[in-house]
Each structure stands twice: as C-alpha cells, then as structure tokens.
Amino acid sequence: GIQVEQSPPDLILQEGANSTLRCNFSDSVNNLQWFHQNPWGQLINLFYIPSGTKQNGRLSATTVATERYSLLYISSSQTTDSGVYFCAVPTDSWGKFQFGAGTQVVVTP
Amino acid sequence: DTGVSQDPRHKITKRGQNVTFRCDPISEHNRLYWYRQTLGQGPEFLTYFQNEAQLEKSRLLSDRFSAERPKGSFSTLEIQRTEQGDSAMYLCASSPGQGVEKLFFGSGTQLSVL
C-alpha cells in the first residue's frame, strides 16, 4: 500500500518563528489532507489540498503531486500551534485515508 | 452543525470485558469511518460505512471487533473480550459521501484495558 512519511518527527519552535513540515508519499494521489491534533486529542482538518497552494491565516500548504510531496508552512508561530500535525492521503475512491506518523510541534513562549 | 460526537470520552475496563463505543456523525453525512490511534502513531483505518452499508473492514479488525450503523445514522463499535493490546484512542470521522472528501473527526474515545 501507499507509504506516507513525515519529517521532521519533532520540532521545537520559539514563539514567532516560522517553520516547514514535509509529507512525502510513495504513489500518485489526487487528494491530500493536513490535520492538527491538539493536546486534548481532537483532530482538526486544516487543509484539503490535491495540488497547488492554499492559505489559512498563518498557515499555508503546498502540494506538488507530480513529485509526491506536500509542505505545511507555519508562520509567526504561537503556543496554540503546539500539537501533532498529520498528513493523510486516500488509498481508494471511497475516502479511506492513510496517515503519516505525524510531526510533534512544541511552541515555547 | 454540531460536529462529530463520540461517547464515552474515556473508558477503563478490565481484560476480558466487552465495551461499546458510540459515534454520532455530522447530520446528513453519509459516510462514517472508524480509526484507531496508539501513542506516537497516526490514526489507522479500521472500517467505514456508506449509509448503513459497511464497505470494508481492515485486517486490524479481528473477530472480536464489530461495527454497526443501523439506519445510516449513528454507529457503534463493540470490542468483545478486550485485551491489553486494544488500549488505544478510537476515532470516528464522517464526510458527506461524494467520493474522496474532507474528513471531520470526533474527539475520540480513549480506551484503557487493565
């Protein structure tokens, strides 16, 4: 099945810093989603991005499907950005998703 | 839109007991998913429904696991004769049901098997 790899596994940022998270996938996909899991376990859908670039406030995401990777940018990080970021790609046409292992982000004041 | 609701939020049980979790999807969402997440890992697919029809079950779902979605509304996930290896966060998600779409997750049920 399709493999999803995320890097780095852990990231410590000082408040206000910028950072980039990466998601590589082993096969062609027509969709990709980024999620943020907060410290209470809630998974929030950040982006639904098959290709190109999308922006949502201080966050933006770019997917280059032909090169099998996606990037999530966090700018001017805040402590509320702490948590685990997951990317997920579909493995069938019914919406079953394969998740990466995540990037644990800690933003310090 | 009240979001995906899961109950209970936490469950502690003794090995060998049966447990049942409930998920209420976003209203009018036809597709419902169950995922399992262990510490330090991403969610792993267990099973999903299109309305009341169960489309697929992962190999992770042993015979001790059963999921239902009667009438295509809420869903239940039952684990019989729980084992310590069943300890995990059980996550439910829903989507409108028009192909590959944005997933909306509930807060999960954290199961601890002693």
Image (spheres, coloured by chain):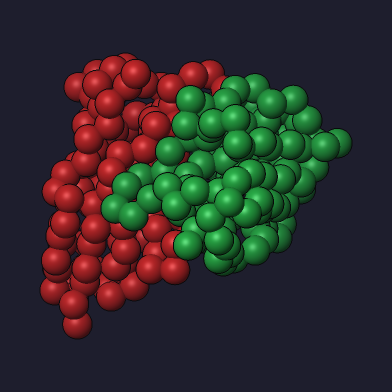
Chain colours: A red, B green
Q: Nearer the viewer, residue A45 or A10?
A: A10
Q: Where's the N terminus of chain B, which quadrant?
A: bottom right
Q: Residue at x 32, y 47 (%)?
A: B41
The reply to whether residue A45 is visible in this rendering is no
Q: Is residue A19 above or below residue A3?
A: below
In the displayed image of the protein, which residue is found farthest to the right? B71
Residue at the outermost bottom position: A109
Q: From what the image shows, is residue B64 above or below residue A80? A: above
In the image, residue B75 above or below residue A2: below
Q: In terms of image quadrants, where is residue B42?
A: top left
Residue name at image x 24 percent, y 58 percent: A104
Residue A106 spot, x, y in % from top left? 22, 68
Q: On the rendered structure, is A76 left or right of B53?
A: left
Image coordinates of residue A109 in percent, x first then y, are 19, 82
- At 55% from the left edge and 61% from the top edge, which residue is drawn? B14
Number of marks in the rendered image: 0
Give residue A90's position: percent from left, percent from top. 44, 27
Q: In the displayed orientation, state which residue is furthest to the front.
A: B16
Q: Is residue B113 visible?
A: yes
Residue at position x 23%, y 62% from top? A105
Q: Nearer the viewer, residue B51 or A58?
A: B51
Q: Quadrant of residue B34?
A: top right
Q: Nearer the viewer, residue A103 or B56?
A: B56
Instruction: Looking at the picture, tell me which residue is in the foreground, A74 or A40.
Output: A40
Locate residue A45 relative to residue B67 in the image: left or right: left
Say whether residue A4 is left or right of residue B30.
left
* Residue A53 position by quadrant: top left
